[in-house]
Image: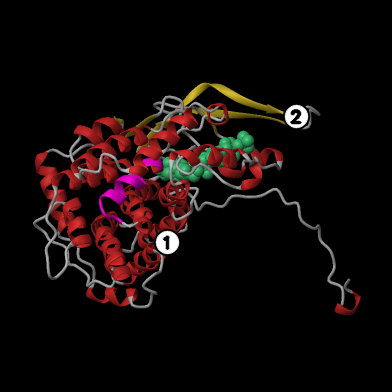
Amino acid sequence: MTNSETKATLSFSDGSASLEMPIYKGSVGPDVIDIRKLYGATGMFTYDPGFMSTAACNSSITYIDGDKGELLYRGYPIEQLAVNGGDFLETCYLLLNGELPNAAQKTEFVDTVTKHTMVHEQMQFFFRGFRRDAHPMSVLVGTVGALASFYHDSLDINDPHHREVSAIRLIAKMPTLVAMAYKYSIGQPFVYPRNDLSYSANFMHMMFSTPCEPYKVNEVLVRALDRILILHADHEQNASTSTVRLAGSSGANPFACIAAGIACLWGPAHGGANEAALSMLEEIGNVDNIPEFIKQVKDKNSGVKLMGFGHRVYKNYDPRAKLMRETCYEVLNELGLQDDPLFKLAMALEKIALEDEYFVSRKLYPNVDFYSGIVQRALGIPTSLFTGIFALARTVGWIAQWKEMISDPEQKIGRPRQLFVGSPKRDVPPIAKRG
Ligand code: SDX
């Protein structure tokens, strides 16, 4: 971050105040105006609901160029990492450490993560309190937060070693907890992790093995899942990452912060969109119903949105959506489902939307959630678990951002202010005199 020679000057038309503010330049992307002295100098706050024009921090982890549809993890394009950049754990190492691992570093990192995939045996009792049909995200919010009660040896956020151990534990145990949530929902016994399998193969094993029959690893499907995890690993200061940072700014332990991130990701405007997008496709049913559906979307009173479309930052095609569509082809071909009706419906819907002025004028393009549900459904993952897979993948991004924030000398507890529009001070009337 460097100081720009240009300053920002704020002056009031009535001449009541004038303030000069520094402008900082990053390595790429928009510059920022440092407004930290604004309130002290003017007695006023900025007003930015939804943080449309607000940089909450400086970061060197993930960069998005919304106009170009570009996504970089530590400078590497997502297209390269997802297609020929190795597996998800290499991306995890990159996000956590800033550089891709060499062979020795990768071996050590994979071995460390592998050896932390089991959860404490008592964790299983938390599941029993849930209904079998509980939404997996409610189970994950509860069980990830509960992890804090087992790891008192890694809760000191000011101890770098504690931060490192917590990061490994969360990355390693999320697949186990997500698979346990699935097994619990279908009444099958929990399946222990296997250290002889890769991270993604082990997840598929814990999801689909039973005591009667082991899961037969299909490398094409495992690679597809691994790519899904890479595509979802991090994404700058999105809502759930900002939630993790805000929770972490109070000094909350990492397990509590990740549980907060999971809660935020659950929303249909955010990570819950992949589940909502598949339900939307199933509701549309066939291509003939697309025009009526699009009509509903354009009717503001309908409350209907084209789920999996639009993005706060991408005003061009989400690069992850392109890669997800390619993965769709690979998985459906591998499974002999080339004529999958939902995939054909999704592509028809995408084509129609991208030719429609309503979407073009609002720069609404498919985002990562538009195709991810189709791929996950083909992998045998139930719709209700899609956002749980998103949380599994995003845990490394949340943790990397949390670690960066804790180590940032500028970080303070996050405490936004407000424009108060409620009642000025007034006296309490006795109940007999209330209207
Ligand atoms: C993720 O932030 C991230 O990086 C998130 C994420 C990540 O990796 O962490 O990328 C993951 O959350 C992807 C987004 C998944 N959500 C969805 O697919 C849900 C559908 N999308 C929308 O809800 C919406 O596009 C948002 C929430 C994603 C973005 O909303 P914004 O930036 O606040 O934009 P907006 O709501 O102000 O929309 C601008 C206009 C509005 O119309 P007008 O008022 O101008 O007439 O576009 C319309 C909106 O009504 N619009 C849509 C639409 N999205 C926006 N209209 C129909 N369908 C949609 N999907």
In this rendering, the answer to whether 14 lies above or below 276 is: above
- Image quadrant containing the N terminus: top left
Q: Position of residue 329 (x, y in %)?
A: 26, 37
The residue at which mark 1 appears reads as 252
Q: What kind of element bears circle 2?
A: loop
Q: Position of residue 162 (x, y in %)?
A: 28, 59
Question: In the visual, does 163 lie left or right of 265?
Answer: left
Give the spatial CA distance, label 1 vs label 2. Answer: 40 Å
Residue sitting at x 14%, y 70%: 211
Nearer to us in this view, 79 or 2: 79
Queried on whether the Cβ of the residue with tag 2 lies below 8 angstroms from ligand 1, the answer reads no
Residue sitting at x 26%, y 62%: 179
The residue at which mark 2 appears reads as 12
The answer to which image quadrant residue 232 occupies is top left
Residue sitting at x 58%, y 24%: 7
Q: Position of residue 422 (x, y in %)?
A: 76, 56
Question: Which stretch appears magenta?
Answer: 370-381
Give the residue type that dot 1 points to: Ala
